[in-house]
Image (cartoon, grey):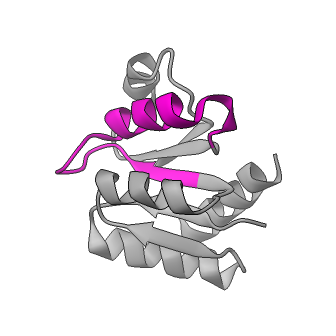
């Protein structure tokens, strides 16, 4: 199975998520900025993109738009990672292709289970 791409600007969260997923046998590639994540998508196939909403170089919303424009129906599923209330995010995401919203903070075991579930779909 293809790896998961994690695009998250906070290095502590990036390391925690990567360690959690790898402990569950999920290969993971990480990027600290939206632009880096978009570049990674050009050169490798991913089974899932986990994407932070608030990043310094470009928002998660912009990354979603660019992935949709570039890959269309061939885009990998996207899980949005955010501490913002899910109902507010859901309104902002109308019309965007997002598989789910993953809450921050998170329980590592629950995160791994949800990622495994998304990868099976």
In the image, residue 8 lies in the stretch drawn in magenta: no
Q: Is residue 2 left or right of residue 54?
A: right
Q: Is residue 57 left or right of residue 12?
A: left
Tell me the quadrant of the picture where the C terminus can be found. Answer: top right
* Image position of 119 (left or right of 101): right
Magenta highlight on residue 58: yes
Q: Residue at x 47, y 23 (%)?
A: 90
Q: Residue 49, how many percent across, how many down?
A: 55, 52
Can you tell which quarter of the image residue 63 is in? top left
Q: Indicate the position of residue 76 as horizontal and vertical percent values.
A: 64, 45
Is the residue 9 above or below the residue 64 in the image?
Answer: below
On the image, the x and y values in percent for residue 20 come to 57, 77
- Residue 106: tell me if it is visible: no
Q: Is residue 96 above or below residue 50?
A: above
- The location of residue 47, given as percent across then percent down, is 69, 56
Is residue 100 at all visible to an observer of this figure?
A: yes
Residue found at the very far front of the displayed protein: 43
Task: Look at the image and give the residue range highlighted in magenta.
Answer: 49-75
**Number of numbered discs on residues:** 0
Residue furthest left in the image: 56
> Which of the image's four quarters has the N terminus?
bottom right
Q: Residue at x 35, y 41 (%)?
A: 60
Q: Nearer the viewer, residue 66 or 119?
A: 66
Q: Nearer the viewer, residue 75 or 59?
A: 75
Which of the two residues, 111 or 31, is positioned nearer the viewer here? 31
Q: Is residue 62 above or below residue 21?
A: above
Residue in the image at 44% along x and 76% along y: 16
């Amino acid at each position: 199975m293809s790896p998961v791409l994690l695009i998250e600007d906070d290095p502590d969260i990036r390391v925690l998520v990567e360690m959690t997923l790898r402990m569950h046998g999920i290969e993971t590639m990480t990027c600290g900025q939206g632009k880096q994540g978009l570049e990674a998508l050009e050169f490798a196939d991913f089974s899932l993109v986990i994407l932070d909403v608030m990043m310094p170089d470009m928002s998660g919303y912009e990354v979603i738009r660019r992935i949709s424009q570039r890959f269309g129906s061939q885009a990998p599923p996207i899980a949005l990672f955010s501490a913002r209330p899910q109902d507010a995010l859901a309104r902002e995401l109308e019309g965007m292709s997002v598989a789910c919203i993953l809450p921050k903070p998170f329980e590592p075991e629950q995160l791994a289970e949800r990622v495994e579930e998304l990868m099976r779909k």
